[in-house]
Amino acid sequence: MLDIPSGTFEAAYHGIANSVLWFTHHMLYHTPLEPVFDEDFSGQWAGYEAYNAAFADALAQEAADGAAVLVQDYHLALVPGMLRARRPDLRIGHFSHTPWAPADYFRLLPDDVAAQVLAGMLGADRTAFLTARWARLFAECCARVLGATVEGGGPPREDAAPEGLSSDDAAPEDFSLTVTYEGRTTHVGVHPLGADGDFLRERAHRSDVADRLAQLRDQVGTGPDGAPRRVLVRVDRTELSKNIVRGLYAYRRLLADRPEWRERVVHLAFAYPSRQDLAVYRDYTAEVSRVAEEINREFGTGGWTPVVLHVKDDFARSLAAYRMADVALVNPVRDGMNLVAKEVPVVSDAGCVLVLSREAGAHEELAPDVLSVNPFDVRETAAALHSALEADPADRAERTRRLAATATSRPPARWFLDQLEALPG
């Protein structure tokens, strides 16, 4: 464990990583008012530099000669460059778990900070991303901000079709792109993270999940005709990028436009509080609860609660919801991957239609078997929910089978080892 002063950690983790870099890569800023880069930001950036230097110093001291070092995520973007300066003998990799912003948006950052982030990551022998889209956008930023030379990989694909990768997109293991800057060449790779199918299937059938399943079925109940109600599930942190509020708007639109679904469907919405130290997250969490309550007041009856909202994190309950879902809604405005989209089909009991945002990294792999939506279009999402609820059970089961196979094709252990084996040298 590193002994990092609390002020340094606060500046690096909350001030820069979560409040600046996360917002940049997920394109979350309300630009008429934010971001504002002033003296407070300068102090926080100094803390971020010190935080990264502490990791680089520790790695430089502890790593064996010629060792491989894999640095993870945006919290430690400067470490590869710092470590390269301290220990040029090391084989250094970096992996980004977030999306990457287009160059025009990335350049909201102060010029020196934008350059420092990119140059820091280019200190790695190889830097990798969850999708080809994010990798290309990183390379575009290197070219436009640093003037670096980019070879391979094709052009940035912000205009990628909703159906996913085009026929000329390489499989992740075949993706090849290099960035050359100040005489050094960094390889850029793609490693989609999959679900751990063996663990999920075993965990989803333990007794605590069975108990939660019975409780949820009791909460969902039966419709006026005595048949079990359909179940629409979402499981998310109350993270701004997860788009929970628009998902609730879409469900409200479904009930308004399609009255035949009233009393015949229940939305299990699990929204687990996240980053409540930040006011904007507290406000967002409160808005989720407010909209859910509003829907229940507008449409609910004595025997039917349209939205069952749970805000206390409970993994067993989440797995139970996955198992019973007829439809799963995963509609982030921007997401590096989104493992919920991959976990639901793995444990589904009878098949589940996945309504998936085209802005989720998982969409590149799962697109052929999902209902794709623009996460900002509430009308389109409501229509997709209707189509999903009407899906033929046999088709739904077959799509779920294919989704599960794709979702588990690159489990975490393979994902990690692939990065290690791909390091040059």
Image (cartoon, helix red, strand yellow):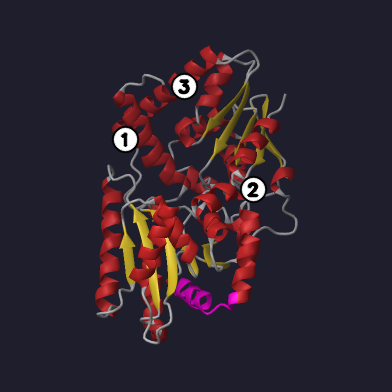
- Residue under label 1: 38
Q: Quadrant of residue 402?
A: bottom right
Give the mark toward the camera: 2 or 3.
3
**For numbered disc 3, what is the local secondary structure?**
helix
Residue at 61%, 38% (x, y): give it: 413
What's drawn in magenta, residue-wise? 379-393
Is residue 392 located in the magenta-colored stretch of the structure?
yes
Q: Nearer the viewer, residue 161 or 60?
A: 60
How far from the left and from the top, in percent, is residue 49? Answer: 42, 25
Mark 2 or mark 3: whose residue is earlier in sequence = 3
Q: Is residue 101 above or below residue 39?
A: below
How far from the left and from the top, in percent, is residue 347? Answer: 54, 58
- Residue under label 3: 55
How far from the left and from the top, in percent, is residue 228? Answer: 43, 77
Real-space Cα distance between discs 2 and 1? 34 Å
Q: How many marks?
A: 3
Question: Magenta stretch mostly in which secondary structure?
Answer: helix
Q: Nearer the viewer, residue 44 or 33?
A: 44
Residue at 51%, 44% (x, y): give it: 98
Quarter of the picture containing the N terminus is: top left
**For numbered disc 1, what is the local secondary structure?**
loop
Which disc is residue 132 wearing? Answer: 2
Mark 2 or mark 1: whose residue is earlier in sequence = 1
Q: Amino acid at mark 2?
A: Ala
Q: Amino acid at mark 1?
A: Asp
Q: Amino acid at mark 3?
A: Phe
Residue at 55%, 55% (x, y): give it: 342
Give the mark toward the camera: 2 or 1.
2
Q: Is residue 340 above or below residue 161?
A: above
Q: Is residue 163 visible?
A: no
